Image: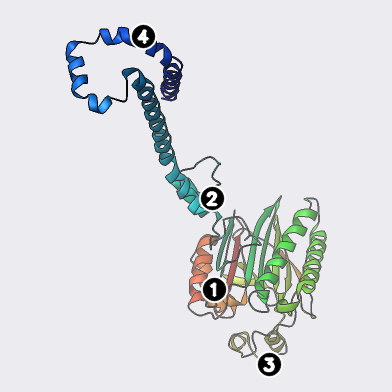
Amino acid sequence: MKRILYAFLLSSTFSINYGLNNSSYLKSNSSDMVNNITNSTINNTINNSNIIANYTTIDLIPIILLIIALIAIVMAMHLIIQKKKKTEPSKMEINSLGKIEPKEELETKNNIMEKKENTIKKIKGEKGKTMDSETSNRDEIILEVDGACGISHKGNRAHNEDCILLKKINDIYLLAVADGIGGHSAGEIASEMAVNTLKEVITEKYREDQSTEEIKEILREAYNLAHNKIKENATGDRKGMGTTLTTAVIKGDKCIIANCGDSRAYLIRDGKVIDRTKDHSFVQALIDSGQISEEKAMTHPMKNIITSALGLDEFKVDDYLWDLKKGDILLLSSDGLHDYVNKEDILKVIDRNNNPEEIVNELLNIALEKTEDNVSIVVYKEY
């Protein structure tokens, strides 16, 4: 089409030049041309002499050629405009979505929408990954690695200040539950800061030849670093923020636990609680002194008062070493579960389910019917 158009324009231009350059030649030979006109043409010319009296046939040739050239130019412009109109709508559509610049390669609408969906932060975390630190909405986080499953849910609160971690590092499993304090968004910042610091320190410093005591030292280092980071960032609206942190490192048939605050770790075997961490809380002190029972502690009006947490002035870390056997269940939870669902009901759920995912889902459903807090649950099964 382009070649035909260019040829047409070239021929038109040539015609104009030819007509203008040779008009004198045509005039000089007009007598010969007139003599060759038929009688009928002469009669018609005479009858219309009033109209063309001022023009000779020779004078009209350049004008006719000029008109032909103008028509060619108009046609060319029309073709260009039509071609532009065909491409313009798709550009406008893409620009309205704000995805590409005018000179960039055009994409289909489906591709644009797909890209847009991929940039939107989803409520649920991807399996096997912690929530990204920039995530603004973490109402429900679901994580999985081989043999372990975890969930963190906002429960019956407006925001989720809990955070969880499940990660396989070389030959160990790293599991954690953190329950932020200080209110949204300070609480969620503190809990996520603790989990991310823990993950970074263990990933960087753990080696497969390390002993359980060396792993405990790394955990203490991670807790201290996280504690200091939270305190340094507890300014302005974040003043007073802190978090609990309960961590399990599973290496072979050994489980190393570190705990600060009132989140918990349970070791469950054959339907019984073999061991569990001790809360750093006011009601735990009452239990230890024999003033109240564990059952009464669940409904005590001061059950939410903790005596130690990362970021607070009172900060201490307890560690435990548990032996694991085939079939053992390791349960980590925030107080949104164990302060509202009693131990017997937790054990029943574990007894009638075979894998961590089933246990986590049923425990969450039970907790959501009772809890007034965020709920975080991590379950590992020794196969």
Pick the front one: 114 or 66:
66
> Along the polypeptide, which appears first: circle 2 or circle 1?
2
> x, y percentage for residue 60?
34, 22
Question: Which residue type carries mark 3?
Answer: Gln
Circle 2 crowding by C-alpha within 10 Å: few under 14, some 14–19, many from 20: some
Q: Element type at marker 2?
A: loop
Question: Which residue type carries mark 2?
Answer: Lys
Q: Is residue 301 above or below residue 231?
A: below
> Along the polypeptide, which appears first: circle 2 or circle 4?
4
Which numbered mark, 3 or 4, is in the foreground of this view?
4
Identify the residue under disc 3: 291
Distance (Cα) linking label 2 and label 3: 65 Å
Which numbered mark, 2 or 3, is in the foreground of this view?
2
Distance (Cα) linking label 2 and label 4: 68 Å
Distance (Cα) linking label 1 and label 4: 116 Å
Which numbered mark, 1 or 4, is in the foreground of this view?
4
Question: Which residue type carries mark 1?
Answer: Ile
Which numbered mark, 2 or 4, is in the foreground of this view?
4
- Does residue 263 appear in this view? no
> x, y percentage for residue 48?
21, 25
Distance (Cα) linking label 2 and label 1: 50 Å
- Does residue 238 appear in this view? yes
The circle on residue 346 is: 1
Identify the residue under disc 2: 99
Q: Is residue 64 above or below residue 226?
A: above
Q: Is residue 335 above or below residue 18?
A: below
Q: Residue at x 80, y 80 (%)?
A: 313
Circle 4 crowding by C-alpha within 10 Å: few under 14, some 14–19, many from 20: few
> Along the polypeptide, which appears first: circle 3 or circle 4?
4
Which quarter of the rendering shows the C terminus?
Answer: bottom right
